[in-house]
Amino acid sequence: MVIGVGGNIGTGKTTVCKVFEYLGAHYISADEVGWEVLPEIADALKTKFGKSIMNGGTIDKKKLRDIVFSKRENLRFLNKLSHPILVKKILKRIGDIKLGIIVIDAALLFDLPAIYKQVDYPILITADDKLKQERAMARGIDKVLFRRILGLQSSEAEMSQQAKFIIRNDGSMDVLKEQCQSIYEEIKNDC
């Protein structure tokens, strides 16, 4: 069984996935896989965005993020370059896990058809915009960048049409854990 967790910046997707992992699921982070893809596309990124995105021999993730989210065209370029490799790596990781429940932490879950098709239980995480911004700022993302990123992501209304479950993450950690536990038990009972 594969659970897919998606949603906008600052909703708490990774926190939800970590709760599922604690409950026994195998965890796959699309962000972590995405960072692994960067060395494979570094030359093309340097050609497009310039050597300023480099920090020694590696790509500076913060500089790349700032450039990519400055214009929709830049984000499209990165996605076109990275998504085929990212999808292939995630599908391989899913295939390598033979037993149990898998949870995939993927902000773009609802925008990646090849991954979405593998998911038995798509879950959308939502939260109040002010809270999303506070969470993003706690991770070093300023208000301007937060607004740009949010503006380039799919709307929660669009994503909710594809979700089997929606978790509203505006409350306490205990409330979130209870929601996750309930969903996880339902999924286990379906197995």
Image (spheres, rainbow, N blue to C red):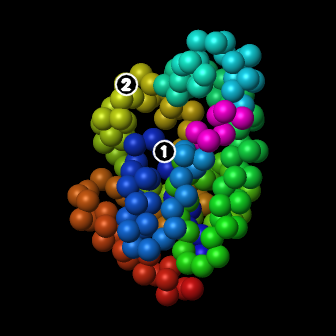
Q: Dot 1: within a 10 Å radius of its alpha carbon, few (fewer than 14), some, or many (20 or more) residues?
A: many
Q: Quadrant of the C terminus?
A: bottom right
SS at mark 1? loop
Q: Main secondary structure of the magenta part?
A: helix
SS at mark 2? loop
Q: Amino acid at mark 1?
A: Asn
User: Horizontally, is 144 left or right of 64 in the view?
Assistant: left
User: Horizontally, is 44 left or right of 100 in the view?
Assistant: right
Q: Which callout, 2 or 1, points to the residue nearer the camera?
A: 2
Image x and y of residue 162, in percent:
61, 60
Question: Which residue occupies the foreground of this view, 131 or 173?
Answer: 173
Image x and y of residue 5, in percent:
52, 58
For the point 38% across and 55% down, the residue is 15
For the point 64% across and 12% down, the residue is 51
Most extreme residue toward the front, as rendered? 57
**Where is mark 1, residue-wise?**
8
Q: Is residue 170 magenta?
A: no
For the point 46% across and 81% down, the residue is 186
Q: Quadrant of the N terminus?
A: bottom right
Q: Earlier in the sequence, mark 2 or mark 1?
A: 1
Image x and y of residue 58, in percent:
59, 25
Instruction: Answer above or below: position of 145 versus 154.
Output: above
Instruction: Answer above or below: position of 15 versus 80.
Output: below
Please give the range of residues in magenta: 34-40
**Where is mark 2, residue-wise?**
142
Residue 51 seen from this side: yes
Q: Amino acid at mark 2?
A: Asp
Residue 108 seen from this side: no
Location of residue 57 (image quadrant):
top right
